[in-house]
Image (cartoon, rainbow, N blue to C red):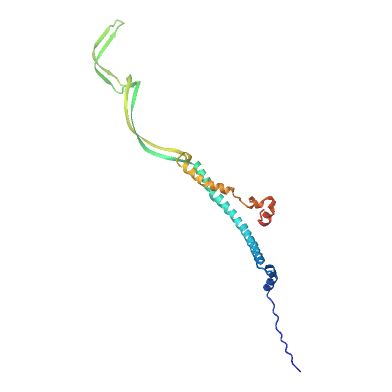
Amino acid sequence: MAKRTIDIQPQRTSPPILGLIKRLAPVFWQGKLLPAFWTVASIFSITLNIILIISLILVGRQLFALKALIQDGLIEGLYQNFVLMDQAHIITDIQVQDTIPVQFTLPVSTETTVVLTKDVSIPNTWVSLATYGQGINLSINAPADITLPVNTPLDIRLDITVPVSTTIPINLPVHVDIPLNQTQLHAPFIGLQNVVAPYRQFLRELPDSWIETPLCDPKLDWVCRDILQTP
């Protein structure tokens, strides 16, 4: 009786990735090079565009935050502070301590009354005196020495010039209020404002969020709501 030999070989199973490739092969290759190239290029282009759109959405959110940081924290802050600096005042009290020399001539022209502080003798004075009445007739016309007693008031007229030479000590606080826009600092402050102003205006015209962009037009509100996820 003849013996039969049965050769049993294990069945090979294809990996899942190979099966997927076999199923997709007709999509990419129909036996012609040009259609296959356009198919691969189209799929690659669509994939790349999707990646770029997602990247732009993510980067756009960061750009809006960066724009707000630069506009509000830097440019607007600089501009407003330059305006305030131009409108500022230097207000303080300065203590002045000094000695001022004073020299001038003082003219004096007036009538006044002086009182003698002691007896004053006037020698060799010609005295003329005449007295009549009550049986007494007296006439004197002769030189004599006259003494004016103390506390005698005398009316005199002064017409003199008095030289004055002295020093005056000064010790006083001086209040100072200097508006900077009336000093030489006004021009630099205005110049700094003009330097920052174009950047300030440029940033103010840029959108602050996706809502202010054409993508959030009322006709495309689904783009903002579903893709950009804006409120």
Q: Nearer the viewer, residue 36 or 156?
A: 36
Q: Is residue 55 above or below residue 79?
A: below
Q: Residue at x 34, y 24 (%)?
A: 108
- What is the count of numbered marks? 0
Give the farthest residue toward the right. 1
Quadrant of the image occupied by residue 116: top left
Where residue 43 appears, as percent x and y from the top left, is: 66, 64
Q: Is residue 168 above or below residue 148?
A: below
Q: Nearer the viewer, residue 54 or 39?
A: 39
100 sits to left or right of 122: right
Q: Is residue 35 above or below residue 83?
A: below
Image quarter of the N terminus: bottom right
Q: Is residue 93 above or below residue 224?
A: above
Where residue 74 appears, as percent x and y from the top left, is: 53, 50
Q: Residue at x 32, y 26 (%)?
A: 162
Give the farthest residue toward the top. 135
Where residue 78 appears, as percent x and y from the top left, is: 52, 48
Q: Residue at x 27, y 21 (%)?
A: 120
Where residue 58 appears, as percent x and y from the top left, is: 61, 58
Q: Residue at x 56, y 48 (%)?
A: 202
